[in-house]
Image (spheres, helix red, strand yellow):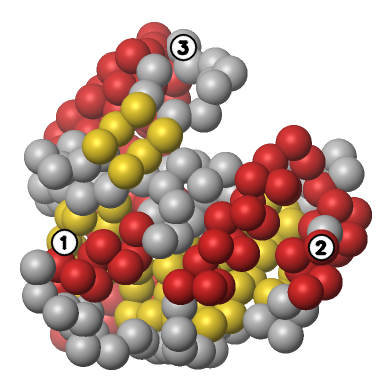
Amino acid sequence: MNAISSLPRLSLIIPCYNEATRVDLMYAGIASFIKEWDAFLEIIIVDDGSSDATATLLQDHPVYLAHADCIRILHQDNTGKGGALKYGCLIAKGDYVLTLDADMATHPKELLNWLAIEKNFNANTIYIGSREHAQSTIFQLSNRKTVGHIFNAIVKLLTPLRIQDTQCGFKLYPVKWASTIFKDLETNGWAHDVEILYKAHLLGLQIKEMPIEWHAIEGSKINVLVDGAKMFFEVLRISTQIKWSYKTKKIRTCN
């Protein structure tokens, strides 16, 4: 592996919605990563209008109290995962933004493995964790894998994206591009990743899939037929919306 030349200034964005049972797990991952990252680090946790005890547990946790200098807890009305990420990305102060899920399905330390592979991150590349990468180690439920393959097929059918896994929450953005893309984000729900990556593609950015270790969340309830239909229509909406917006801008530019 290549040696890591230097660690970039980094902002972690973690959206939370009704994560009371996972707050300890999340903070354990954060505390471990703080010890490893010897450079500027800010951790932005966005509570997306949780209706359980998430907000209180976040504020009272020993890890937060010990590292309040680098951990920020924000609260907003419930808008969806995309909206929570948008809130965090638009105030990030790092040179790079790493988004990840509160359940620590992929540990933030995975970023160190990426740095060992890349040596330096490219300022015009978005790096995304891919559960389909040949070198990834995946622990997941069979129904999630089936739905994932269905969704990937839908994305390839309806968009120009040729990415094997758009939906993994573990993504690294240069902050200048995160700000550009997220400020106009219109999809606040789970399909926001498709809109983000589609717009990145139109901007000419490279999208690079990277290996990860990923653990499935137990108790996930997915109906292949019902959720498959929802996925199709949501991606169709995003694709149509972006194509129309892009076409309209081109017409205005020509005029």
Residue 77, percent from left and from top: 79, 57
Q: Residue at x 66, y 56 (%)?
A: 27
Q: CA distance from mark 2 to mark 3?
A: 38 Å
Tell which tag, 3 or 1, sits nearer the viewer: 1
- Disc 3 is placed on an element classified as loop
Q: Which label sits on residue 62?
A: 2
Res. 38 visible in picture: yes
Q: Amino acid at mark 3?
A: Asn
Q: Is residue 138 above or below residue 65?
A: above
- The residue indicated by pointer 1 is 208
Q: Residues within 10 Å of mark 1 (few under 14, many from 20)?
A: some
The residue nearer to you, when weighing 119 against 81, is: 119
The residue nearer to you, when weighing 172 against 231, is: 172
Q: Quadrant of residue 29?
A: bottom right
- Disc 1 is placed on an element classified as strand
Give the position of the C terminus as an image quadrant.
Answer: bottom left
> Between disc 2 and disc 1, whose residue precedes?
2
- The residue indicated by pointer 3 is 223
Relative horizontal placement of residue 230, taking residue 44 as reference (left or right)? left
Q: Amino acid at mark 2?
A: Pro
Q: Residues within 10 Å of mark 3 (few under 14, many from 20)?
A: few
Q: Amino acid at mark 1?
A: Lys
Residue 119, percent from left and from top: 16, 79
Q: Do the residues bearing badges 3 and 1 touch, measured as CB atoms within 8 Å?
A: no
Relative horizontal placement of residue 183, taking residue 56 as reference (left or right)? left
Q: Is residue 251 above or below residue 15?
A: below
